[in-house]
Amino acid sequence: MAVMIVLAGAARAEQFSANFKGTDIQEFINTVSKNLGKTIIIDPAVKGKVTVRSYEQLDEKQYYQFFLNVLDVYGYTVIGMPNNVLKVIAAKEGKRAALAQNGGEAIAEGDEVVMRVVPLRNIAAKDVSPILRQLNDSIGVGSVAHYEQGNALLITGRASVVNGLLELVREMDQDDGNRVETLALKHAAAPEIARMVNELFREEGKRRTAGASSLRLVADERTNSVMIAGDDRSREHAKELIDQLDNKSVTQGNTQVIPLKYAKAQSLVEVLTGVSAGLQNEKESAAANVALLKNVVIKADEQTNALIITAAPDVMRDLEAVVAKLDVRRAQVLVEAVIVEVQDGQGLNIGVQWANKYGGGTQFAGQMPGVSAGFENGMSDVFGKANGLMTGFYSGNWGVLLTAIASNNQNNILATPSIVTLDNAEAEFSVGQDVPILTGSQTTNSDNVFNTVSRKTVGIKLKVKPQINQGQSVLMQIEQEVSSVADSAGATPDSLGATFNIRTVNNTVLVDSGETVVVGGLLDKSNSELESSVPILGKIPLVGALFRSTATKASKRNLMLFIRPTIIRSTEGYARQSQRKLGKFDAEQQDDRELNDALRGEIAGDKKALDNRAFLATVASIDAFYLRGVRP
């Protein structure tokens, strides 16, 4: 039963009193609608019984708030429509309904659901919205969202709560005096001061519950000054710190000892001296009053392989960064080479590609067979027609190459050096002897002869400087020399001195790691006398000349260089190459032992059988001699 008492007076506003006991909620809403003269639409889902009583007289405004409070207790809310019509719906649906009818500027009161758009001017909406969410309604009708591009807040909830949030936002969105000031420094370096103060305020801001500090310092190296941006209090605090730091003691006593892991300290001193000179020029042009920038000292301690650097903090930081990039482990290159002489271009048929897979190549002197000509017999055909330096590439197996060279008696292997060197570091291999050379002679009054003798190194020299390029390619500078004393060097007293045979190669080539470079075509022509005779009979005085013949033979020797670089970037790679070389050495030792055992067995054989074989060989030689048309 619902009872509504209305008291009217001529000189005062209407007063209301309410007493509802077990009244249907829709009947309660209709009663309020009649008393207030408002049109109220009731959602069909609104159901229940209302029991409520007021013991005081309420004016119209109080009576409406009493109505909203009762509905809020029972889980319902009132939404004001643009046409002054009220709508009663479930509280959880109030948020969507408020968004649909937003547009009024009047500030409502009480439990009516409202939505407000709040633009911000001095603070960021995304920073404020988490705080407001914690203070808004927790019954589902309240929400706070932010629009970052427009820096605005969207607040939905009961009017009484929203009004409180709006007041809080107005207090927070105040001009905090953010300004930008420029402060010139007298002694300290601007970048270093800006870094230290920014880091200090950043750590201080993390400890605050309100978030990080808005203060920021930017260094202007051109004028050696710092620009300070922030609120008045933060700027004053920053200026106090800068005043304490901007003194001569800041840049004094800044000496560092940097031990090196891989680089050589003495070699880095020259590099760092040049770098520091450039840095000083930049800093001095930016801040002419920073006198200590001129006092950069860089020394090397060879015993500990360390650098000792004295410099201003910002210059020190730059130099340390340069040292860190230079002090790295350098890759190494295993350089394997075979230096061999080939007699008359014979003895090698290993498929070397002379700049064209069908033949041809790069020849640096004389005539060259055309690239369209094919050579079926490998190097014997190529060097038979070439008379100058040629280079090419061999793509086969290195071990097969060595076997092919060593297995032919036409080849004379001069050296097989194997050297490991650092990237971009020169390696040298040399084997030979110092030959005395008579350079002067003087006879004294007592007929004593004094000779002046100098020495010249002859033999085999190989210099290689590998440079590792992008990827797996190696640029190699090759210098090779093979020298010897000519046979005519045993000169007469009237001769001018010794004669030397010298063959040299200076070349630069780009090759992939593991690929073999071949340099050939260094010809050496010689004439030799060959004597053929019948064993025993050819040595008989007078008559023996009938059983001998002599001939002059012209021969050419080709000097060839096979060289292969292999990049080693780790200790594991170095260990693998060492194991491979050790295995090869063991195999060669085993071959030598087997050969010695075979020779000892043959020598220890039946001496009589050996004598018979010698006799038969002598008879065969006599028959062959006469068959050639030589008669006694």
Image (cartoon, grey):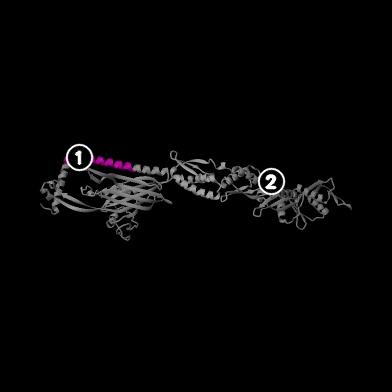
In the image, residue 429 above or below residue 357: above
Q: What x and y, as percent, mark residue 220?
A: 58, 50
Splitting the image into 4 quarters, where does residue 572 fall?
A: top left
Q: Which residue is mark 2?
A: 134
- The three-letter amino acid code for the residue at tag 1 is Gly
| Visible residue check, residue 435 | no
Query: Could you tell me residue 211's position as x and y percent?
Result: 64, 45
Q: In terms of secondary structure, where does tag 1 sit?
A: loop
Q: Is residue 590 magenta?
A: yes
Residue drawn at (65%, 53%) of the image: 148
Q: Quadrant of residue 373?
A: bottom left
Residue 252 x/y as whole percent: 54, 41
Left or right: residue 579 versus residue 189 is left
Q: Characterize the magenta stretch by its predominant secondary structure.
A: helix
Q: What is the number of the mark on residue 132?
A: none
- Label 1 sits on residue: 605
Inspect the image, locate mark 2, and give the three-letter code of the amino acid beneath it: Gln
Query: Is residue 414 or residue 85 the one in the foreground?
Result: 414
Task: Residue at 64%, 54% (x, y): give it.
Answer: 149
Name the secondary structure under disc 2.
Answer: helix
Q: What span is in magenta?
A: 584-608
Residue lying furthest front in this view?
A: 445
| Callout 2 touching callout 1 (CB < 8 Å) | no
Q: Is residue 248 in sight in this rendering?
A: yes
First-in-chain label (2 vs 1):
2
Determine if the magenta segment contains residue 597. yes
Q: Nearer the viewer, residue 181 or 215?
A: 181
Crowding around mark 1 (Cα neighbors within 10 Å: few <14, some 14 to 19, many 20+) is: few
Residue at 23% from the left image edge and 45% from the top image edge: 442
Percent x, y of residue 451: 24, 44
Q: Dot 2: few (<14), some (14–19), or many (≥20) neighbours within 10 Å?
A: few
User: What is the quadrant of residue 202 in the picture?
Assistant: top right
